[in-house]
Image: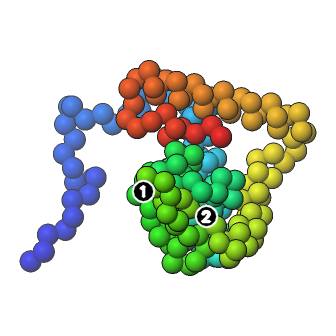
Amino acid sequence: MTSAPITAADAAVTSDTITMPLEDVIDPDEFTPRLLALLSNALVYRESHELRRQFKLGTNEWRVISALSMRPGMSATEVCEFLGMNKAVVSRSVTRLQLRALIVLSDGPRGSRPLYLTRAGAEMHDRMLPVSLRGQEIITEGLGATEVAALNEVLRGMLARIRSDAALQGAPGSPSQYPID
């Protein structure tokens, strides 16, 4: 005989169980960090879905391609620092991009391994770019150039404060995990 899973209705409610909302809580519709996270998650999901559908690559691979389009010859470690991404994620992305012949690793000084786009990688960049730029369009729709510049300045300031706070708090990793550029 198998036993049925225990449901919330079956759980014992004791005098120590809180069954009503607390009085001092965060209003989720007015909590800016939550709104920024929801916006970021929605943009990344949209971008990743489109990149996978169209190119069989995801947002992480796009970020590596984009970084190398701006700074050819970066090592994987430099890509991590530039993008604020986890080394394991970048490593997997680099491997996928190598297998697709979109990037190559070269031999560099002191054992470094500079990364470069191939011609096919540069072409892929140009094909993927509009998907990423659509996220910019979604965010800035209805804003003038001055408002976009002001918004970007506010966001850069927020990132700088997060980096500074993380450094002061001794957060693990480097402040570059909170990239500004």
Residue 98 appears left or right of 15: right
Q: Height in image: 44 above or below 176?
A: below
Q: Is residue 10 above or below residue 155?
A: below
Percent from the top left, x then y, of residue 9? 27, 53
Residue 133 placed where, x, y %?
Answer: 76, 57
Q: Which residue is mark 1?
A: 111
Name the residue at 76% across, 47% down.
Answer: 139
Q: Closer to the N terminus: mark 2 or mark 1?
A: 1
Please name the residue that numbered disc 2 is placed on.
116
- Indicate the position of residue 109 as horizontal and vertical percent values: 48, 54
Looking at the image, which residue is at 19% across and 45% down?
12
Q: Check the image and tell me how it is coloured.
A: rainbow
- Residue 64 quadrant: bottom right
Amino acid type, label 2: Tyr
Label 2 Cα neighbours within 10 Å, binned few <14 / some 14-19 / many ≥20: many
**Residue type highlighted by circle 1:** Gly
For residue 59, say whether it is visible.
no
CA separation in Å, label 2 and label 1: 16 Å
Residue drawn 78% across the image and 64% down it:
130
Instruction: Tell which tag, 2 or 1, sits nearer the viewer.
Output: 1
Q: Is residue 171 left or right of residue 9?
A: right
Label 2 secondary element = strand
